[in-house]
Image (spheres, helix red, strand yellow):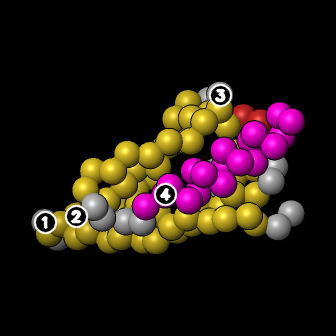
Amino acid sequence: MTQVISHPYFMTERKIVNNQQFTQETTHKVNLHHTFIESTENYIALESVLDISYRALSTHFYFLYLHTDKGVLAFQSKTNPAPFVAVFHDIKASSYS
């Protein structure tokens, strides 16, 4: 199945080595398809996704929330997820038509 839209997110990992703390940030993508959403750690059927929302904490930091029937998944992003959310709502609306 072809990807409809993707949105970048990042994960921060902190490690302590020799009493020094190191922070490593890795970039990933959450991909929206017509029947599922996938990220680095998750594969979720679209019928299990109840809603998608986001919150802007500043002009350059956002949380993207996937509300599923198993709970809420949060993704940290430096890009506004509004286009991703809009495409999701369009796909969900067309699946109910």
Determine which of the numbered discs, if any, sits on residue 69 in the image.
3
SS class of the residue under badge 2?
strand
Which numbered disc, 1 or 4, marks the residue closer to the eye?
A: 4
Residue 14 can be seen in this image: no
Quarter where residue 80 is shown: bottom left
How far apart marks 3 and 4 lie (CA) works out to 21 Å
Residue that label 2 marks = 16
SS class of the residue under badge 4?
loop
Identified by mark 4, the residue type is: Pro
Identified by mark 3, the residue type is: Asp
- What residue do we see at 42% from left, 66% from top? 79
Query: Which numbered disc, 2 or 3, marks the residue that appears first in the sequence?
Result: 2
SS class of the residue under badge 3?
loop
Could you say which is closer to the camera, residue 7 or residue 73? Answer: 7
SS class of the residue under badge 1?
loop
How far apart marks 2 and 3 lie (CA) works out to 36 Å
For the N terminus, the quadrant is bottom right
Q: Which residues are magenta?
A: 80-97
Which numbered disc, 2 or 3, marks the residue closer to the eye?
A: 3
Identified by mark 1, the residue type is: Asn
How far apart marks 1 and 4 lie (CA) works out to 37 Å
- What residue do we see at 80% from left, 54% from top? 34
Determine which of the numbered discs, if any, sits on residue 81 in the image.
4
Residues packed near mark 4 inside 10 Å, few (<14), some (14 to 19) or many (20 plus): many
